[in-house]
Amino acid sequence: REYNEQISRMITVVEESANGPTGNQVASSSNIAPENRSVESVSVNSNIEDGDKKMPATSEGGEEKKGTIASLSNVPLNISTGITEGLTAVTHATKTLIGSEEGTPKGAAFVTFASLRARASALQMLHHEKPFAMTIREAPLPKDIFWPNVGLPHTKQQLSWLAGFSLTTVLCIFWAVVVTFIASLASVETLKQEIPFLRRWIESVPFLQDLFAQLAPLLLVIANGPILSFLLMKFSAMEGWISVGKLNISLFTKLCIFNIVHTFFILVISGSIFGSIGAIVNNPSLIVNELATTIPSEASFFMQYFLVRSFLNCGMELLRVFHVLHAYIRTKVGPNLTEKEKNTTWGWFAPLSDPGTFDHAGALADLLLVFLVLFVYGVISPFMSFILLLVFAIHGMVHRHHFIYIYPMSNDSGGLLWVQAVKVIIICLFIAEITLFGVLGLKKKAAAVILMIPLLAITILFTIYIGQQHFVVTKYLPSISAIKKDKENIANNVDNGFLRGQYNHPALQDKHLLPDNMPNDEPYQSFDDNA
């Protein structure tokens, strides 16, 4: 009601002033970013001290762009009768809609280019002599922009990255304690020796021994589930990434570290040391023999773990248990007055019409752990290869079905995750070769150790070779390909205006927002200067 009253009052003042003598002209009260006018874009983050002045938004013709709430551009006003009252009405009406603050200008922008060659050159040039004064990055797709991190100053970016890294380290240490405790459950005999009251329970109820042995893989699957991914995603968002794709790469890297450190190393080491902790305390030199004998024996645990995780996770995914539960809760809570509201996600609860997006980072990180175990135990325990073949077949069937029929491709990063996955696979190769090198050395197999040295040297040389140019080619578009594509676009008269306005903030995308219960064919009364 207050907004309507102010708009009516403003229109009255404008009409009265327009009928009087011609006075000065008042510019538009809005500050909408200029429209993008090309096909490719980059993100520019500037920290130049004298570059923080807020510039007026202009249209292509050079004149100031008109707002959508109430524009007073090019309206003649009588200075003596209405300018002050009219501006007061406009200001109050605008503050009623958007609040008391006009917003904070940021030293960042999305710059678009008419040619791919110019874009490629801009990405690889040094644009300022002062370090970190101007940073050029490849711009994400408009739908992948993480707006809260756009325009962060460099100092705040560094502090945010440090905070995210510190929290991840603390969580890694804490999670190590949790995983170690879960791994200890698999060694029931050791638990009976170290915990007297638990020994009495197991002796009185014999089936508890089998329960603890089967419970460890299930608890490990739960521990490495959505809770861990949620926490690591929050830490990744603190690092200042402006792209959802980059956020997923950061999350993927963290999940791979957690899987390698916790699910592999801590399980193997804790299983060997915890099983003979008493003898190791009395004779520390026994740790070498324990590692040599216990690492191969952990193959059965990893077989059990991967089978439990594959059947449990893929079975829940096929049945869509959590999605159906969320959809049922969504029908009971949240706004449900209109059909649009019923089909809209509210909080964590999404209707069945919104399938969500596939967790590429989590799924790929889990599969890389399978690769690591395969590299290590494929030689030590060949039967592991057949178990992991079944695991890949289950995941392939479920993911192929869901990619075709369930999940949209809206969060496809265009292969960014695969580049990082190749780097992690190489690290897994080094870990597997060093582990095999150590196991053979602990078993005093001199010939096998000598034969492992050329394989390790070849892996090092291969890593150095592909690190020279291969990853650079995946990061930047070659100039030959850019020029060739530019010539094709010119020959085909490609319209470069399809990105116009796409990189505006979502709050500036829609000029007129209608209520959900208003029919689309109902006429809308605009309050601009042409009304």
Image (cartoon, helix red, strand yellow):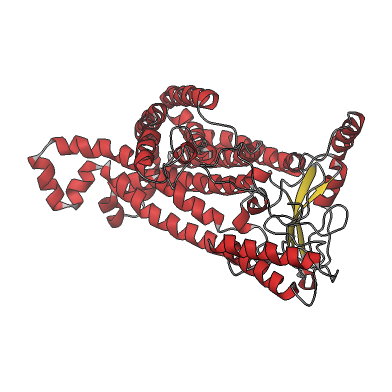
Q: Is residue 55 visible?
A: no
Residue 326 x, y percent position in the rendering: 38, 39
Count of number-bearing discs: 0
**Farthest left residue in view:** 204
Residue at (63% x, 61% y) in the render = 8
Residue 294 x, y percent position in the rendering: 36, 40
Q: Nearer the viewer, residue 287 or 213?
A: 213
Q: Nearer the viewer, residue 492 or 232?
A: 492
Left or right placement of residue 154 versus residue 262 in this view = right
Task: Decide: is 308 above or below 132.
Answer: above
Q: Is residue 345 visible?
A: yes
Dividing the picture into quadrants, the one containing residue 10 is bottom right
Residue 486 x, y percent position in the rendering: 88, 36
Residue at (37% x, 33% y) in the render = 324
Left or right placement of residue 140 versus residue 226 in this view = right
Dividing the picture into quadrants, the one containing residue 380 is top left
Residue at (85% x, 48% y) in the render = 121
Left or right placement of residue 486 versus residue 149 in this view = right
Task: Decide: is 177 above or below 299.
Answer: below
Residue 280 x, y percent position in the rendering: 31, 53
**Farthest bottom residue in view:** 80
